[in-house]
Amino acid sequence: MKKSVFVYMTIIFLLPLFAIGCKPPVNPVTDNINLDVCVYDSTCNDKMSLGHRGTGQYSYWATENTLAAYEYAWKMGADSIEIDARKTKDGALVIMHDGSVIRTAAGTGKIENMTLAEVKALKTRRINPDMPTQTIPTLRETLDYLKGKTLIDVDMKTDDMVSIIHEIADAGMLNAAYLAGIGSVAQAQMARSVNPSIALMPKISTLEEAEAFIDNCSPIAFFEIEYENAVPELVDYIHSRGVKIHINALNKYDLLGRAGFKTVFERGADIIQTDRLEVLVPYINSLENY
């Protein structure tokens, strides 16, 4: 049974390459180029899409966490793009989900044991032959590339939150990039002590946690909530305080396509993180009353 499910999921996620070709579909690009457009506007009811690691972890359009993946995601109409920030041995911030480079780049070794020069010397692996040759980008290269294009969900894969915040500020992206992976009020307050303007997306599961963050750390850009924890009481409270909700559609709800996205939005999501922008963006565009 598990094998058949895996085969089915593989077919679903690789189907766009065979059905459409190697170029991703193009949609109108987002207007959400900063957090004031909708995220910090409590009257904005727009539904939004978030490209997981760019065009997705399955990398059939472009290798995850590359500039090509971010360009394709933007052209596909993503409102926000998720990136993963790590530190090299010599203190540089680069974009890589895994601790090791082996899965997505033609090399071996852990990022924390490599210098920036060693990381930049690697070429990324690719499925799509139409994707240009890519190297592993730095955080600054990514911020500069996406400036004025989309929002940026910065998933911290390092304990050095301070360096990430300074990089966001230096790039002039305080009103477009927001920190994911905030797990406590104390961590959020530490981030704000580094820069009071840094945007935050804490991950919560209870009403009490939401209240604590809102009382002590407002404004909050998004709350990240697991689907099963997005109960009406919590969703209604968050929305009543003018905060937007992020829920992942990864795997299960992605697999269901438009029906899955409908379910996640009905659960209370304002923004959905997906590996299937080619389905989610047209679905959002088809919705009425948003």
Image (spheres, rainbow, N blue to C red):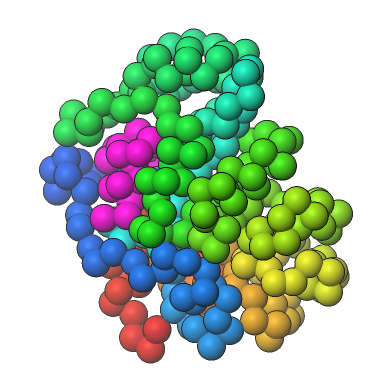
Viewer-proximal residue among 87 and 231: 87
Which residue is rendered at x = 60% and y = 22% of the image? 88
Left or right, 284 with reference to 41: left
Viewer-proximal residue among 14 and 71: 71
Which residue is rendered at x = 75% and y = 51% of the image? 194
- Residue 212, given in percent of the width and then of the height, sits at 85, 69
Does the magenta portion include 285?
no
- Residue 2, given in percent of the width and then of the height, sits at 48, 36
* Tally of numbered discs: 0
Viewer-proximal residue among 227 and 111: 111
Left or right, 28 with reference to 164: left
Left or right, 246 with reference to 257: right
Q: Quadrant of residue 134?
A: top left
Task: State the extent of the magenta-drawn residues as a range.
Answer: 55-75
Judge whether 278 appears above or below 59 on screen. Answer: below
The quarter of the image holding the C terminus is bottom left
Q: Quadrant of residue 10?
A: top left
- Residue 217, given in percent of the width and then of the height, sits at 78, 67
Judge whether 82 appears above or below 49 on screen. Answer: above
Judge whether 233 appears above or below 210 on screen. Answer: below
Which residue is rendered at x = 43% and y = 11% of the image? 107
